[in-house]
Image (tube, grey):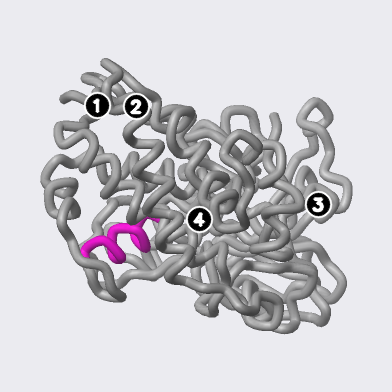
Amino acid sequence: MREEATPGIRQDNWTGLPPMARARTRRTAPLAGRAGAAPPAAGQRRSRTVAPSLLDPGATRDPHRVHQVLREQFPLTYDPLLRAWVLSRYADVATALTDARFTHGHRPGDPPCADTHVDVDVEELRAVAERTAHVLARRIADRPQADLVADFCHWLPAGTVAAAVGVPYRDMMRLVRGRAASALAGQCTAQIAVREKALASFLANVLADPDRLAELRDAPTGPTSPFTRAWTESLRRDPPVQIAVRRTGADVPVTGGTIPAGEPVALLIGAAGRDPERFREADRYDPRRDDPGQLTYGTGFCPAVALAGLEAEYALRALLDAMPRLRLVDGFRPERTGLITRAPRSLLVRPGG
């Protein structure tokens, strides 16, 4: 299984993640005196005493069932397969992403980005995102069938950065993931891969509902526009980054106990985004929800964050402009894959309807 390296989610952050072939250790409830699992609610009977792991066979095919058990029964547990403590509830994960007691992590949009990125022209980013999206959309408009993941999502984030820094189109995949991307995004360079996955999940969500697609066709942009809400909701329900890794710099109380200082902690962003304590009907994609929120990005400025939203906006506009009758292939259901990052493997569409 291969995962793209992303800022704050590097493989070396796993402190020696064991291969699945050796993952046979039983996971018990957290050790007494260090941390404990939350007790069941009144009248609720605990269904198991061993916490599941995302490295269990088959867990990556449907991680949400594992997430649910962890949230409800093991909000804090030590997973010997991951060799890390695991947090799965929204309140704990959201805190850990910004609390100074958790170290060794970077998330685009968090405060350090403001000191890293200077002289970035957002309007220029908007222009190149729009231009690149329309070029790519026209390339597939006349096909009887296309895969938006392979033919569109894979190219738009790289192409946008290439255009922004003046890399010729023919060289973009060779250069944009290295020197060219660094010139624009600094330590957020590897977010190109994350933006690909975020875009694929967004298009999968909006194409699944023709009425929603029609609503977004001419939707304005802005903090409260239908488009922005649809994008934020996709990041919540299907975040491209499923797990972030941090390390405690001090003892930290969380739901279920206290994590000792100096310990690795796996933050399950995918589980937190579907926490029913934070979001109503948390498994449902609902851009109209009155309790929006997402944990993929921070709230500060970062070109990677700005580009992700602009690419999603102009991707949809360009696709619908070039292919007004665009729809999913009959019977096709996107299959999301991945452990650390997650997105549809393919997105088969009929450009001509």
Image point 52% across, 37% down: which residue? 154
The residue lying at 74 percent from left, 56 percent from top is: 78
Residues rendered magenta in the picture: 226-234
Question: Does the magenta-highlighted stretch encompass residue 229?
Answer: yes
Q: Is mark 1 on a helix, strand or loop?
A: loop
What numbered label is drawn on residue 154?
Answer: none
| Dot 4 alpha-carbon crowd within 10 angstroms: few under 14, some 14 to 19, many 20 or more | many
Kindly report which numbered mark, 1 or 4, lies closer to the viewer in this rendering.
Answer: 1
| Residue located 34% across and 24% down the image | 348
Q: In this view, does 83 lie to the left or right of 131?
A: right
- Judged from the image, the secondary structure of the residue bearing numbered disc 2 is helix
Report the residue marked by disc 3. 14
Residue 198, position as x, y percentages in the image: 47, 49
Spatial CA span between label 2 and label 4: 35 Å
Disc nearer the start of the sequence (2/3): 3
Spatial distance from mark 3 to mark 4, Cα to Cα?
19 Å
- Nearest to N terminus: mark 3 or mark 4: 3
